[in-house]
Image: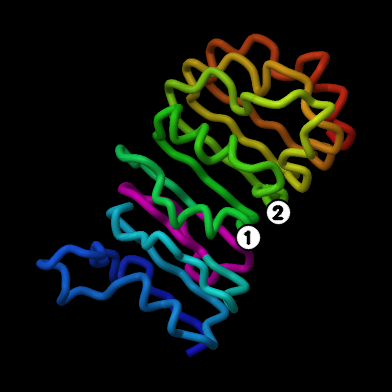
Amino acid sequence: LEELYMWESFHQWAIQGMVEDTSKACLSELRSLSHLTTLCVQVSNPESVPRQFHIPNVQKFEIVIGKGYDSVTCYPNSRSLSLRQIKTSIPEGVKDILQNTEDMRLFCLYDEMIRSILDVDPGTLNNLRYLKVVACMETPFLLSMNQSASDAPAILAALESLHLHLMSELFLICPKLLPVGSLHKLKLLKVLNCKRMWIAITATLLQRLLSL
């Protein structure tokens, strides 16, 4: 099997270790599909994502984790990940997906979840080209930058498009100077209904936006 499309037709995956779920299909079984190159799947319960979710030969994917509806092509041409209305912590297995994700959409997540995704190990998200963050109400900064710019590697180095919508507490994209090479490919920045963001592009951020 090389291509697997399961959008809407199936999304109640088993939770590993739960006895009552033994009759359901488990996401970890996908790792046994050694020829799988394209995957389209929805996972309603984040607890169904296994701790190791790396599928070696998958080149294109569209994965939606959480509740709610997102526009899905189901014939993915890129590597897309959507996280929606997740009330618990971000599943450990998501980290296996992040490194290969090109298109990421975050909807209705708590700030601690945003931090666990965007403030990950430097370089993890450097394949990301499109990022959309919607209705993550608690988030004051998109990137918090725990390291000094001189010591840290580039962040979001391949990002071309950034959309920020309905972020009521968002104040700045980043309060500090980003490392050299960060956001240097960004061509489109779209900010809608972010009431606290008076200045979208600060002087320090402008130093890194070479393509905008």
Residue in view at x 61 percent, y 52 percent: 103
Viewer-proximal residue, 17 or 69? 17
Q: Position of residue 149 (x, y in %)?
A: 80, 26
Colour scheme of this structure image?
Answer: rainbow
Q: Residue at x 59, y 35 (%)?
A: 119
x and y percentages locating residue 95 in the rendered image: 52, 53
Category of crowding for the residue at label 1, using alpha-carbon neighbours closer than 10 angstroms: few (below 14), some (14–19), many (at least 20): many
Q: Residue at (43%, 76%) from the top-left corner?
A: 5
Is residue 72 one of those drawn in magenta? yes
Where 75 sits versus 119, above or below?
below
The stretch of residues the image draws in magenta is 62-81
**Residue at x-position 77% and y-position 27%:** 178
Residue at the far left: name it.
Answer: 20
Residue designated by label 2: 127
User: Mark number for residue 100?
Assistant: 1
Instruction: Give the quarter of the image for residue 11.
Output: bottom left
Q: Give, as a three-letter code, the residue at label 2.
A: Asn
By secondary structure, the bulk of the magenta-drawn segment is best described as: loop
Q: Are marks 2 and 1 in contact (CB under 8 Å)?
A: yes
Is 24 placed left or right of 133 in the picture? Answer: left
Q: Secondary structure at mark 1?
A: loop
User: In this image, 206 relative to 77: left or right?
Assistant: right
At numbered mark 2, what does the secondary structure look like: helix, strand or loop? Answer: loop
Residue 15 is inside the magenta segment: no
Q: Image check: 38 left or right of 145? A: left
Q: Position of residue 148 (x, y in %)?
A: 76, 23
Quadrant in the rendering for residue 20: bottom left
